[in-house]
Amino acid sequence: MTPEEKFEKWWKTQDDGRYSKFLDMIKPLCLRIWLEQQKEIDRLWEGIRQFLDGIDIEILQKLLEEGKDESEHRSTHP
Protein backbone atom coordinates (compact mmCIF):
# COMPACT_ATOMS: atom_id res chain seq x y z
CA MET A 1 0.00 0.00 0.00
CA THR A 2 1.40 3.40 -0.99
CA PRO A 3 1.62 6.27 1.49
CA GLU A 4 -1.17 8.01 -0.46
CA GLU A 5 -3.40 4.93 -0.15
CA LYS A 6 -2.68 4.73 3.58
CA PHE A 7 -3.63 8.38 3.91
CA GLU A 8 -6.87 7.86 1.95
CA LYS A 9 -7.82 4.91 4.15
CA TRP A 10 -7.04 6.89 7.28
CA TRP A 11 -8.81 10.03 6.01
CA LYS A 12 -12.06 8.14 5.36
CA THR A 13 -12.19 7.12 9.02
CA GLN A 14 -11.86 10.71 10.25
CA ASP A 15 -14.76 12.57 8.58
CA ASP A 16 -18.00 12.21 10.50
CA GLY A 17 -19.86 14.29 7.91
CA ARG A 18 -20.14 17.52 9.89
CA TYR A 19 -17.28 19.31 8.18
CA SER A 20 -17.05 17.58 4.80
CA LYS A 21 -16.79 20.74 2.69
CA PHE A 22 -14.05 22.21 4.84
CA LEU A 23 -12.17 18.93 5.03
CA ASP A 24 -12.34 18.56 1.26
CA MET A 25 -10.65 21.96 1.00
CA ILE A 26 -7.78 21.11 3.35
CA LYS A 27 -7.31 17.46 2.34
CA PRO A 28 -4.55 18.17 -0.24
CA LEU A 29 -2.62 20.19 2.34
CA CYS A 30 -3.03 17.48 4.96
CA LEU A 31 -1.78 14.85 2.52
CA ARG A 32 1.32 16.91 1.73
CA ILE A 33 2.04 17.41 5.44
CA TRP A 34 1.51 13.71 6.13
CA LEU A 35 3.84 12.68 3.32
CA GLU A 36 6.53 14.95 4.77
CA GLN A 37 5.97 13.97 8.42
CA GLN A 38 4.12 10.66 8.48
CA LYS A 39 4.38 10.23 12.22
CA GLU A 40 2.73 13.60 12.85
CA ILE A 41 -0.69 13.01 11.23
CA ASP A 42 -2.43 12.21 14.51
CA ARG A 43 -1.19 15.45 16.07
CA LEU A 44 -2.20 17.37 12.95
CA TRP A 45 -5.66 15.83 13.02
CA GLU A 46 -6.06 16.54 16.72
CA GLY A 47 -5.33 20.22 16.04
CA ILE A 48 -7.79 20.32 13.14
CA ARG A 49 -10.50 18.73 15.30
CA GLN A 50 -9.93 21.22 18.11
CA PHE A 51 -10.14 24.04 15.59
CA LEU A 52 -13.36 22.71 14.07
CA ASP A 53 -14.95 21.94 17.42
CA GLY A 54 -14.42 25.57 18.39
CA ILE A 55 -16.32 26.89 15.36
CA ASP A 56 -20.09 27.10 15.02
CA ILE A 57 -20.92 24.81 12.07
CA GLU A 58 -23.40 27.34 10.63
CA ILE A 59 -20.74 30.05 10.57
CA LEU A 60 -18.26 27.68 8.91
CA GLN A 61 -20.82 26.75 6.25
CA LYS A 62 -21.59 30.44 5.61
CA LEU A 63 -17.89 31.25 5.23
CA LEU A 64 -17.37 28.31 2.88
CA GLU A 65 -20.27 29.43 0.71
CA GLU A 66 -18.95 33.00 0.62
CA GLY A 67 -15.53 31.72 -0.36
CA LYS A 68 -17.06 29.55 -3.09
CA ASP A 69 -19.05 32.49 -4.46
CA GLU A 70 -15.95 34.71 -4.42
CA SER A 71 -13.89 32.04 -6.16
CA GLU A 72 -16.52 31.63 -8.87
CA HIS A 73 -16.69 35.41 -9.34
CA ARG A 74 -12.92 35.63 -9.78
CA SER A 75 -12.91 32.82 -12.34
CA THR A 76 -15.60 34.50 -14.47
CA HIS A 77 -14.33 38.08 -13.98
CA PRO A 78 -10.53 38.11 -14.09
Image (cartoon, rainbow, N blue to C red):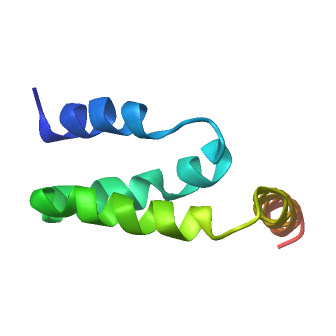
Residue drawn 76% across and 63% down? 60
Q: Is residue 73 left or right of residue 26?
A: right
Q: Is residue 12 left or right of residue 8?
A: right
Q: Is residue 68 left or right of residue 42?
A: right
Residue 4, picture quadrant: top left
Task: Give x and y (percent) for residue 43.
Answer: 26, 65
* 43 in relation to 2, above or below: below
Residue drawn 14% across and 40% down? 3
For the residue pair 65 and 15, the one nearer the viewer reads as: 15
Residue drawn 40% across and 69% down? 47
Task: Give x and y (percent) for residue 23.
Answer: 55, 51
Task: Give x and y (percent) for residue 67.
Answer: 79, 66
Q: Quadrant of the C terminus?
A: bottom right
Task: Give x and y (percent) for residue 73.
Answer: 89, 65
Residue 5, picture quadrant: top left
* 46 in relation to 28, above or below: below
Q: Quadrant of the N terminus?
A: top left
* 76 in relation to 2, above or below: below
